[in-house]
């Protein structure tokens, strides 16, 4: 049993999906299956119940899940502490964010950090911001950038970076649609409008609440992962989308869509950094978090 095996096991235990877990671990599903089989052989127990439709953890698998998380955290902390004793931090710090966040925030955040800690390697992964908290919780990433949910999990620390309104967008070449939907929203104006929405996450929750408060069942044309894809589909004329303003401000397709001034307005996003509370004592994460705090104090 080694740390890689435990990391691969944890990913499968958290996703309960071989294809998604193997993709996240950058290995093939067959390699992941062999790793799980080796763990089961070493321990002499069954860790997962598998059939053609689902994957679930056994009681023994749940116990190993807890053990694996604690063991990997202790190993990472010990390694970094020993390195810190040599007066220069080194190692890897994994980070997850959307494509928009990668060029909206990261340069400013990471430029000073890289100057102060040149031997810390940043491993950046991009994807759907709706996955940010989950990837931190399951240990896939050390740090993630995303929107703060209405209820923050107790084991997750959050540091705010900025606020961004949520705006509906229409194709720029359909001014009659923009005129129809601007202003106070009504059931008659919105109920037959094709919508392009996030398939999950905070934006989807807030759009569902917005439509429900108006007694509207939205006509959903497409559900997509990632706000950039929503802007793209709206620019092509497929429907009306909902995205954070910061995504629109940084999109190369911004001139091809129009932001609506629809009311009532949706609750803005509070965008920031997530990390596990217990991992804040990890020297690498502590260094990053402390520098972020110092930056906000100066601001």
Image (spheres, helix red, strand yellow):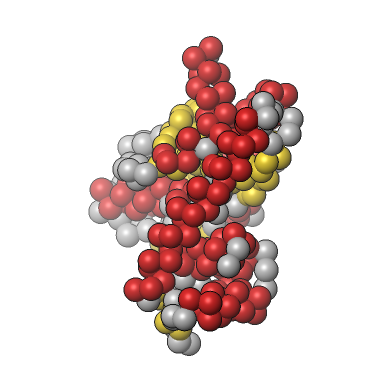
**Horizontal arrangement in the rendering, residue 203 relative to residue 33 (left or right):** left
Q: Position of residue 96 (x, y in %)?
A: 59, 46
Q: Position of residue 233 (x, y in %)?
A: 60, 55
Check the picture and name the quadrant holding the N terminus: bottom right
**Horizontal arrangement in the rendering, residue 252 relative to residue 96 (left or right):** right
Q: Position of residue 90 (x, y in %)?
A: 69, 36
Taking the view exactly as shown, the residue that stands out farthest to the bottom is: 52
Q: Is residue 186 above or below residue 216?
A: above
Residue shown at 30%/55% (left/top)?
216
Where residue 104 sits, quadrant-wise, is top right
**Horizontal arrangement in the rendering, residue 36 relative to residue 56 (left or right):** right
**Horizontal arrangement in the rendering, residue 140 relative to residue 276 (left or right):** right
Q: Is residue 105 at least partly visible in the picture? A: no
Q: Nearer the viewer, residue 107 or 235?
A: 107
Taking the view exactly as shown, the residue that stands out farthest to the top is: 298
Q: Is residue 23 at least partly visible in the picture? A: yes
Where residue 143 sits, quadrant-wise, is top right
**In this figure, what is the number of numbered marks?**
0
Q: Is residue 91 above or below residue 160?
A: below
Residue shown at 44%/76% (left/top)?
47
Q: Nearer the viewer, residue 248 or 4?
A: 4
Q: Is residue 212 above or below residue 271?
A: below
Residue shown at 60%/74% (left/top)?
35
Q: Nearer the viewer, residue 5 or 130?
A: 5
Q: Is residue 54 above or below residue 257?
A: below
Residue shown at 62%/37% (left/top)?
82
Q: Position of residue 177 (x, y in %)?
A: 49, 47
């Amino acid at each position: 049993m080694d740390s890689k095996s435990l990391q691969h096991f944890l990913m499968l235990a958290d996703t309960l999906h071989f294809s998604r877990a193997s993709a996240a671990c950058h290995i093939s599903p067959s390699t992941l299956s062999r790793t799980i089989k080796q763990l089961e052989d070493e321990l002499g127990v069954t860790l997962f119940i598998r059939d053609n439709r689902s994957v679930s953890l056994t009681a023994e698998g749940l116990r190993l899940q807890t053990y694996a998380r604690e063991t990997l955290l202790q190993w990472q902390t010990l390694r970094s502490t020993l390195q810190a004793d040599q007066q220069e931090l080194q190692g890897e710090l994994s980070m997850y964010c959307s494509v928009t966040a990668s060029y909206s925030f990261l340069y400013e955040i990471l430029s000073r950090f890289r100057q102060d800690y040149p031997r810390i390697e940043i491993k950046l992964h991009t994807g759907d911001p709706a996955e940010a908290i989950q990837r931190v919780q399951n240990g896939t990433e050390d740090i993630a950038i995303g929107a703060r949910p209405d209820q923050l999990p107790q084991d997750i620390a959050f540091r705010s970076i900025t606020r961004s309104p949520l705006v509906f967008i229409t194709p720029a070449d359909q001014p009659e649609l923009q005129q129809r939907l601007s202003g106070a929203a009504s059931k008659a104006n919105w109920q037959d409008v094709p919508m392009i929405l996030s398939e999950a996450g905070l934006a989807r929750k807030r759009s569902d609440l917005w439509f429900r408060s108006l007694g509207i069942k939205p006509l959903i044309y497409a559900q997509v992962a990632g706000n950039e894809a929503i802007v793209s589909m709206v620019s092509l004329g497929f429907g009306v989308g909902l995205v954070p303003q910061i995504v629109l401000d940084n999109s190369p397709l911004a001139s091809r869509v129009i932001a609506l001034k629809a009311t009532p307005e949706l609750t803005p996003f509070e965008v920031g950094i997530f990390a596990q509370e217990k991992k804040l004592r990890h020297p690498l994460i502590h260094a990053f978090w402390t520098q972020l705090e110092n930056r906000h104090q100066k601001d």
